[in-house]
Amino acid sequence: MRMYDLIAKKRDGLSLTGEEIDFIIRGFTNGDIPDYQMSAFLMAVYLRGMTDEETARMTLAMAHSGDMVDLSGIEGVKADKHSTGGVGDKTTLVVAPVVASCGVKIAKMSGRGLGHTGGTVDKMESVPGCRTSLPSEEFIAQVNHIGISVVGQSGNLAPADKKMYALRDVTATIASVPLIASSIMSKKLAAGADCILLDVKTGNGAFMKTLDDSIALARAMVAIGTHNGRKVAALVTDMDTPLGHAVGNSLEVAESVQVLRGCGPADLTTVCRELASNLLMLAGKGTLEECRALFDEAISSGRAFETCKAMFAAQGGDVSVLEDGSFRKAKYSHVVRSPRGGWVCATNTEQIGIASVMLGAGRTRKEDPINFAAGIVLNKKAGDAVQPGEALATLYADDESLFDAAAQTFLAAYTFGDEAPVLPPLVMARVTESGVERF
Amino acid sequence: MRMYDLIAKKRDGLSLTGEEIDFIIRGFTNGDIPDYQMSAFLMAVYLRGMTDEETARMTLAMAHSGDMVDLSGIEGVKADKHSTGGVGDKTTLVVAPVVASCGVKIAKMSGRGLGHTGGTVDKMESVPGCRTSLPSEEFIAQVNHIGISVVGQSGNLAPADKKMYALRDVTATIASVPLIASSIMSKKLAAGADCILLDVKTGNGAFMKTLDDSIALARAMVAIGTHNGRKVAALVTDMDTPLGHAVGNSLEVAESVQVLRGCGPADLTTVCRELASNLLMLAGKGTLEECRALFDEAISSGRAFETCKAMFAAQGGDVSVLEDGSFRKAKYSHVVRSPRGGWVCATNTEQIGIASVMLGAGRTRKEDPINFAAGIVLNKKAGDAVQPGEALATLYADDESLFDAAAQTFLAAYTFGDEAPVLPPLVMARVTESGVERF
């Protein structure tokens, strides 16, 4: 088998066999196939696409390029969720404890934030003492004991993906549905869960800007998981607006606790409820309606919050901050006021994410430190009425000099109008093995 | 300017500006742009194409990446011809002397054979003593003195093309019209001629297998030359059948002499006549009919043959072999006979070329030596009637053990039938600045 011929085959729009795909992924990972051949292949995939079968096989080969996490030591159904990334997206901190509190095991690896989007691992680390890297035995034991552990990615998970992503990043081959889908799902397959619920964010704060693109990505990821014997579904959810009010690490943990206590913002609560109940359904806990009731009961009984605290406690976190909100506060705050009255018609959500990074809440390079207390609490979001001079948001930082530029960036994200805008539904589509429902 | 953005632009099917194209070619040539970005770009070009303007600019940038041959020391119009390569294609050895003998200067760089096709420089070197590498001053002086010099490519001509071709060769991006056209034309532009006649071979012995592809390539090359201020035309000529009867270096030189003496095979004579008269017309020597008459007169008067001999003599060649055909003969010959009677319906011309390489007449790697006496003389070509056992061809080699495999390969190239086949015209299309004529 020669890489040349496989490039030519994909270039001509033909489908590759499983053996051919394995050859490419294995050869590229071990260095037999040079970057310059792989980048030509990736451009051919970008422009010619891949069938579901090809994408599924490639994803499996990518997953098998490194460690496959062994969750066989955990009894019962193991569930995972994944978000394609958003601003104010703290759903894992709600969904995972809810699902675990309903008897479905969560043995989950999460990511860190990069660019304008945050990451669960960073948020968890804003709880003083919380470890997000556990020895494998401790991780497994914790899941068996309290039903849940969420840690950072460890080990050599899908090194083929890492190498392919680095090459795509410099050859303009990122934005391809089969390549994005295989990148995400290779790590999910390697992470070992039986049931995977995907949250594909769509809109101006998301990687996928349009509903159609987001549905295509969701469809591709569900197909990959299904082809490889996992139970997978996806919700396409709105990211034209930040989720909830808090953007920034400890601010978002506090807001998650509000949801777990039944007093969180409506939009965040709704999205968490839909994600959790879809994941519970995948895990065999009943119909969607029954699983929604499970969610409501897990919250109202306090069981989900107890599970959340148990997880943080097991990982060394000081749970008092969850109970009384006594996170370290940022030294300074700054209120951004509306320049006019009327309605907030829309917000550029990516810009809001960038403003929070400017305040210290995120990183622009992998090596950057994070200020867990920094961030933004929104008072007004798209669809809200506003008076001239009314507070749009409060910015938090430990360095007052950051406010000027961040406030400017933040305010530039807002569009005002004289009429209330029509907003999209929070959950815009649901994609399962059997098809796509749009809402 | 970032290569990433230019890859993305071409990936999305957009046109690049002249400055962007210059940036790519300059950056790739000097090593600033790595292979893995260039190969992604080349695949994007392969699948998205290029406009005539882009291709012309890229070709110019490629030409300027190295030495530009300075022909300003030569008086009068300088003409060049180029063939995309065929089997038995010795037209340069006829066309160049004819055109030079009509007062149009030929200061030409030719190539060597590779794979199943031969090259003019190898053929010239089969004339004992003939030098194909001359110091620049001697080259110019010879052209001024006797009107013609044909040498091998020297200097650092279009290094961008060399580097791009090497990358295309391993990334399945060879067969792209703008990339092939720019590769050929970059060297032609750098070689400095005012008028360029292109012979685009089409058929099973050519690089381009179909008439439409060949016309597309011809059109692209004519557009490149015209955009860059040269007078360019192209003939698309048949390569479903070897040209003439001789395949192999000294065998082909001897056959060229037959044409120059007015007693060459009809097909070869016709193609040479059309090529030469089109080139003479480009050089301003009259209408096509007038230029055909010029060709006939250059042959019948013996002037073209005299010019040919003068060129070889000036380059150190022993012209006695041209006059009396006293080339060194191969030690052995072997007659391949027809297994049946009827008609030769078709020949796989590439296979015939390969058979001649097997006999020692060509090279499969650049470093391989050539046996100038080896080759094939065809007795029967497509369209000829044949008796059972009649000679189809005579093979020549210095090693008898080569005949078995070569004869087998040669015979496998023949298709026989019970009816005379309908053959395509020798010249199938003519492409000029003003359009395409199909014949």
Image (cartoon, coloured by chain):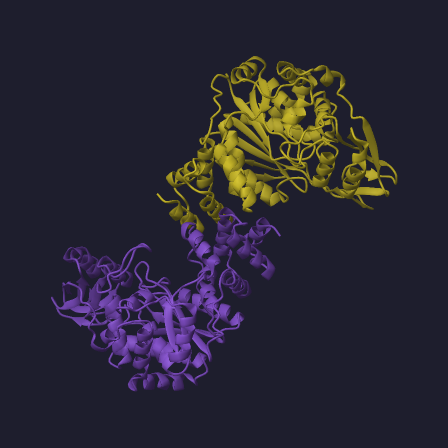
Chain colours: A yellow, B purple
Say left or right for B107 vs A91: left
Q: Quadrant of residue B381?
A: bottom left
Question: What is the count of numbered marks?
Answer: 0
Q: Would you say residue B220 is visible in this rendering? A: no
Q: Residue sitting at 49 percent across and 76 percent down?
A: B434
- Relative vertical location of residue B131 with respect to residue A138 in this rendering, above or below: below
Residue sitting at x 31%, y 74%:
B312
State left or right for residue B335 relative to residue B191. Answer: left
| Farthest-out residue, left | B389
Q: Is residue B355 toward the left or the right of residue B112 in the image?
A: left
Q: Which quadrant of the view contains residue A408? A: top right
User: Which residue sits furthest top?
Assistant: A145
Question: Measuring 57% from the left and 15% from the top, which residue is drawn there?
Answer: A142
At which x and y percent is residue A136?
52, 18
The quarter of the image holding the C terminus of chain B is: bottom left
Q: Position of residue B29 (x, y in %)?
A: 51, 54
Residue B47 versus residue A57 in the image, above or below: below
Q: Is residue B288 above or below residue A185?
A: below
Tell me residue A182's x, y (percent). Answer: 51, 37
To which quarter of the image does residue A22 belong?
Answer: top left
Q: Where is residue A30 drawn, in percent x and y?
A: 43, 35
Q: Is residue A60 visible in this depiction of the protein?
A: yes
